[in-house]
Image (cartoon, helix red, strand yellow):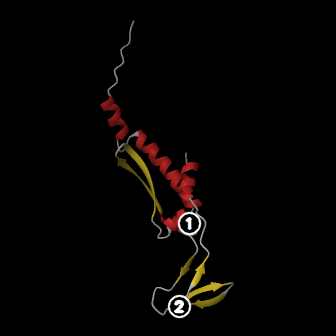
Amino acid sequence: MSVEVRIDPGKISRILRLRNGRVARKLGERTQRTAGIAEREAPGSMGRYITWKVVDGPRGLQGVIICDHPATRFVLDGTRPHIIRPRKRNGVLRFEVRGQVVYSAYVRHPGTRANDFLGRALRMGR
């Protein structure tokens, strides 16, 4: 007795690309879990700016996690020491130091160490 198995690569590809198929649902669950980890790992209010989605990419379905906080790039890459000046000409900076309000024409920022919270979330969400 012999058994013949035929594999149709086109059908397999279509099954894997179904938007509501099992693969897409599993990918969505994993992407959502990883985005949740990224929200917890993100500093300050940055976690509230994280969203996720499953999209059709060039090589099939992809889970995408997005953080559109304006400072995301600075947090991920870190910054070198730099001077911060007011936006308006002849303006002043206002901030608090130990509960006291301080005004200054500029601030020498010491820089920040890189915090790759998205990469960490990706590794933890496997």
Depicted 80 relative to depicted 41: above or below: below
The spot of residue 92 in percent (x, y) is: 53, 90
Residue type at the position of mark 2: Val
* Residue 68 versus residue 60 in the image, above or below: below
The residue positioned 56% from the left and 59% from the top of the image is: 116
Residue 13 location (% of width, % of height): 34, 35
- How many numbered marks, from 0 up? 2
Q: Nearer the viewer, residue 74 or 82?
A: 82
Do labels 1 and 2 touch, CB within 8 Å?
no
Q: Secondary structure at mark 2?
A: loop
Q: Name the residue rendered at 69%, 84% in the picture.
A: 98
Identity, as a three-letter code, of the amino acid under mark 1: Gly
Mark drawn on residue 92: 2
Residue beneath label 1, please?
78
In the picture, measured across the screen, residue 5 lies left or right of residue 101, that is left
Secondary structure of the residue carrying tag 1 is: loop
Mark 1 crowdedness (10 Å alpha carbons): few <14, some 14-19, many ≥20: some
Q: Earlier in the sequence, mark 1 or mark 2?
A: 1
Where residue 105 sits, quadrant-wise, is bottom right
Name of the residue lying farthest toward the left? 10
Mark 1–mark 2 distance (CA, rounded to whole Å): 25 Å
Observer-nearest of 45 and 112:
112
Instruction: Point out the image quarter for the C terminus.
Output: top right
The local crowd at label 2, few if under 14, some if 14 to 19, many if 20 or more residues have their Cα within 10 Å, is: some
Q: Residue at x 36, y 14 (%)?
A: 4
